[in-house]
Structure formats: C-alpha cells, structure tokens
Amino acid sequence: MKVAALQLSTFKGESEIKSYLQTALEQKAKVILLGEYLLSPFFKKFENAKKSLLIDTIQSNNEQLIKISNFYALTIVTPMFEVVGNKIYKSIAIINKGKTLFYRAQRLMPYEHWNEAKFFANTLPKNIKIPPVFSMGGLKFSILFGYELHFDEFWLQFKIHQVDCVLLPSASTFDSSLRWRSIIKMRAFLNNCYILRANRIGQYQDEITQTLWNFYGDSLLVNPNGEVIDCLGDREELLIVSLDKKYLKQIKECWQFR
C-alpha cells in the first residue's frame, strides 16, 4: 500500500491543501502524514502569549482541516492542538471523513530554550501507554511525536503490539539531521518496522538570542531493515512511498527481533 508525507513550513489555504490531498489520492495513497506546527504557529512564537488569544485561531484551523477531510478517502494524520475549555493540549489527530481520534503527547520537551512541558496542559505519566494503533491494507499503524522517538518505552509497546509502521511527525532543527537519521534507522531496524517521518521546513528567529532556527525538512521513509527508501529535500514537497507487506514479512523472519 502507499502512504504520503506532506512537508510544509506553515498551514496552507484550503485550495492548496485540497490540491495536495487530491495528488495523494490520485497516487493511491491511503494515509497522509503532516509535520509538526503546521496548523498553528511554531511553539516559540506564542509561548509567552495569552492562551485565550490563540484558541479561536486553533479551533478555526482544526475545523477547516476536519471539514476538508470529508471530501477525500484518505486517513489524515497530523499534529493538532486540542482545546478543552481554556486548556491547550499538544496532540496528534487521526482524521478520516470528518471523524477525529486524538492522541495527547506523553513526553514533551522541558528545555530552557524549548519548554513545551511548561506551556501545554498534557499529563506526563510515569508509565506511558501505547498510542492508538489502527489497521489498514493488512498493516498495523501507530503514531508518535518526534521528541517521543527517543524514549524506549514506546518502542517496547510497538513491538508487543506488532506495529508495522510508525508515523512520526516532527519539527527538527539546528544541526540534527544526521542524528535524527541515525536514530530513525536504528528504531526501524530493531523493531523491524517502517517509519514514515514528516518534518517541517522554514525558519524561526529567536527574539532573545536572535539565533536563526532552520527547519531542514528531510522527510523520509525508512524500511524494516533500517534503510532509507526515499526522502525529500528542504523545500515544500509531497513524498509518496510504498509499504511492502511481503518484504516486511521476510525481514521479520530473517532477524526474529519481533
């Protein structure tokens, strides 16, 4: 079966989003993955703003994409801020024909220069629960935020539940491209699963340090043998790739990690 990764810098207008979804559909993709911070501004731009000022914008963008999904036989997987009352949660939405399932991040960055844990209302449990698992085309899919990639507990759960493909939206920046590739290839190989990563592009200038943050793209698909099958560069692009059930079975039988 085919899956797609949409690499953007910011959320586009309705006509542009529809164009990408139509292209993915024409190429017979069943799932399309978007990177982080596309439905709303990059986290650093609003961390000191009043949450009440953001909620209307968040809800408007969310409703727009959910409405668009009704017209396409695609499962859309995208990071999406979830608003409950006056609280904002960092979540991933699995959207199909207007129906939405949310997964709230269980690990958030706590760093001084990038402190999502302080801003968002997510509960960060001591013991993680496996993110949602859904089946399509004879394969089991699950989802994970880029930061959560680093925690072994998730991958143990994926192995227990026999997940075949992990959908990984991210917003990676600085000089981390080689490190991210290495970690993704390692996780895919040790779990004998596909990993589809959708990263964002564009730039952000820190208001205090004036440091320029470069989101470098490199959205990619890694196969169950830990090899990069295809990737994008640093521009706005759509990646469409195939997942091979027969090859997946061969690799599982070969290495016996699962």
Image (tube, grey):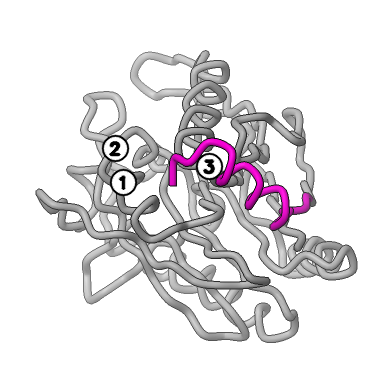
Q: Is residue 242 magenta?
A: yes
N-term mark: 2 or 3 = 2
Residue at 67%, 37% in the rendered image: 220
Q: Is residue 225 magenta?
A: no
Label 3 crowd bin: few (<14), some (14–19), many (20+), radius 10 Å? many
- Residue 199 shows in this picture: no
Residue at 28%, 64% in the rendered image: 52
Reading the image, the residue beneath label 2 is: 152
Residue 94 drawn above or below residue 88: below
Residues drawn in magenta:
241-258
Report the amino acid beneath label 3: Asn
- Determine whether label 1 and label 3 are within 8 Å by CB: no
Label 2 crowd bin: few (<14), some (14–19), many (20+), radius 10 Å? few
- The outermost residue toward the right is 26
Residue 212: give x, y in percent of width and height.
51, 18
Q: Secondary structure at mark 2?
A: helix
| Residue 42 in the figure: left or right of residue 252 | left
Residue toward you, 155 or 109: 155
- Determine whether label 2 and label 1 are within 8 Å by CB: yes
Residue 3: give x, y in percent of width and height.
71, 58
| Residue 135 in the figure: left or right of residue 119 | right
Q: Secondary structure at mark 1?
A: helix
Reading the image, the residue beneath label 1 is: 156
Q: Secondary structure at mark 3?
A: loop
Pair 2/3: label in front: 3
N-term mark: 1 or 3 = 1
Reading the image, the residue beneath label 3 is: 192
Residue at 53%, 64% in the rendered image: 140
Report the amino acid beneath label 2: Asp
